[in-house]
Image: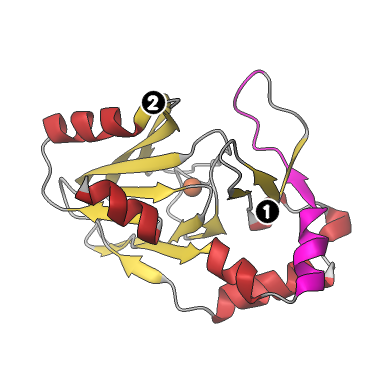
C-alpha cells in the first residue's frame, strides 16, 4: 500500500481531511491500540501533555511502535508538530559516541504494569532494527554530561525539524522507534484537541 511505503520511507505520514471511519481503518491496518489519550489543554495542568507549553523532542512509551494523532480542533496560534529523524542523527555521530549511547538507559515513562525502572536509549526490535527511546527530561543525572549525550542534544538543536500544523480531521502518524516528536507552545485560542493513539503492530 502506498501510504505504508511512505511511512516506512520517511518514518512519518500526514494525511489531510480524513473521516473518523478512515481513521479507524487506518489504525486497524497498522495494528492494535494499546493506549489512548486526549491531548487537550487543562488550565493549571501539572502534566506536560495537557499544559500549553512547547515540548522538546522525545519519543513516547517504547511499547508504542506508532503514534497516531487525530485532530479535532487546532489552536489559531502555535501548536505545530515538530519531527526529527533520530536514525539519521545517530548515523551522523562519531562511532565512539554511537557506542557510548548504546550503553545508556533512560528513566522509564511508567504506564504499564510490567514497566521497569529504566529502558535503553537504543534497543533492537524483533526485526533487528534499531529502536530509539529518548526524552530530555528522562536522562539520568549521571548521563547528563556524557559527551555522546551532549553531542546528540547539540545535533538535535542544530537540525532543522519538519514542522507541520495539523488541521481539523488531519491524521499524523510517526514511527515512534525512529522519529522524535515535539510541539511548539500552544498559544492564541488554545482550544486545541487531538486524540493520540499508541499502536502495537500486528504480529506477522
Ligand atoms: Fe509525546
In terms of secondary structure, where does tag 1 sit?
A: helix
Nearer to us: label 1 or label 2:
2
Identify the residue at horizontal 27%, vertical 32% (top origin): 29
Which residue is painted at 65% across and 18% down in the image?
A: 113
The 10 Å Cα crowd at callout 2, few under 14, some 14 to 19, many 20 or more, is some
- The residue labelled by disc 1 is 137
Q: Is residue 190 left or right of residue 92?
A: left
Question: Residue 46: within the magenta?
Answer: no
Secondary structure beneath label 2: strand
Q: Is residue 38 left or right of residue 48?
A: left
Residues rendered magenta in the picture: 95-113
Residue 107, image x and y in percent? 74, 42
> Pointer 1 and pointer 2: residues touching (CB < 8 Å)?
no
Q: Which residue is mark 2?
A: 33
Q: Is residue 44 visible?
A: yes
Quadrant for the N terminus in the image: top left
Question: Counting other residues with Cα less than 10 Å from the Cα at mark 1, is it few (<14), some (14-19), or many (20 or more)?
Answer: few
Q: Position of residue 203 (x, y in %)?
A: 45, 25
Residue 9, given in percent of the width and then of the height, sits at 37, 59
**Does the magenta run of residues contain 98?**
yes
Residue shown at 32%/43% (left/top)? 69
Q: Quadrant of residue 167?
A: bottom left
In whole angstroms, how far apart are the C-alphas of marks 1 and 2? 26 Å
Q: Considering depth in this image, is 53 or 36 the residue closer to the camera?
A: 36
Q: Residue 53, labelled with which disc?
A: none
Please state the horizontal and vertical placement of residue 22, each as a whole percent of the image. 14, 34
Amino acid at each position: 500500500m502506498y501510504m505504508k511505503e511512505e511511512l516506512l520511507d520517511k518514518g512519518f505520514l500526514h494525511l489531510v481531511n480524513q473521516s473518523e471511519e478512515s481513521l479507524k481503518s487506518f489504525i486497524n491496518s497498522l495494528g492494535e491500540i494499546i493506549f489512548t489519550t486526549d491531548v487537550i489543554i487543562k488550565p493549571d495542568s501539572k502534566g506536560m501533555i495537557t499544559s500549553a507549553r512547547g515540548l522538546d523532542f522525545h519519543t513516547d512509551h517504547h511499547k508504542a511502535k506508532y503514534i497516531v494523532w487525530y485532530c479535532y480542533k487546532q489552536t489559531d496560534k502555535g501548536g505545530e508538530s515538530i519531527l526529527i529523524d533520530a536514525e539519521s542523527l545517530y548515523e551522523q555521530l562519531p562511532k565512539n559516541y554511537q557506542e557510548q549511547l548504546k550503553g545508556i538507559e533512560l528513566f522509564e515513562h511508567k504506564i504499564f504494569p510490567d514497566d521497569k525502572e529504566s529502558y535503553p536509549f537504543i534497543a533492537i526490535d524483533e526485526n533487528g532494527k534499531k529502536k530509539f527511546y529518548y526524552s530530555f527530561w528522562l536522562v539520568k543525572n549521571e548521563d547528563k554530561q556524557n559527551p555522546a549525550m551532549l553531542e546528540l542534544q547539540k545535533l538535535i538543536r542544530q537540525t532543522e525539524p519538519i514542522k507541520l500544523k495539523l488541521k481539523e480531521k488531519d491524521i499524523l502518524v510517526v514511527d515512534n522507534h525512529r522519529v522524535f516528536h515535539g510541539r511548539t507552545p500552544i498559544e492564541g485560542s488554545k482550544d486545541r484537541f487531538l486524540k493520540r493513539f499508541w499502536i502495537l503492530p500486528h504480529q506477522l
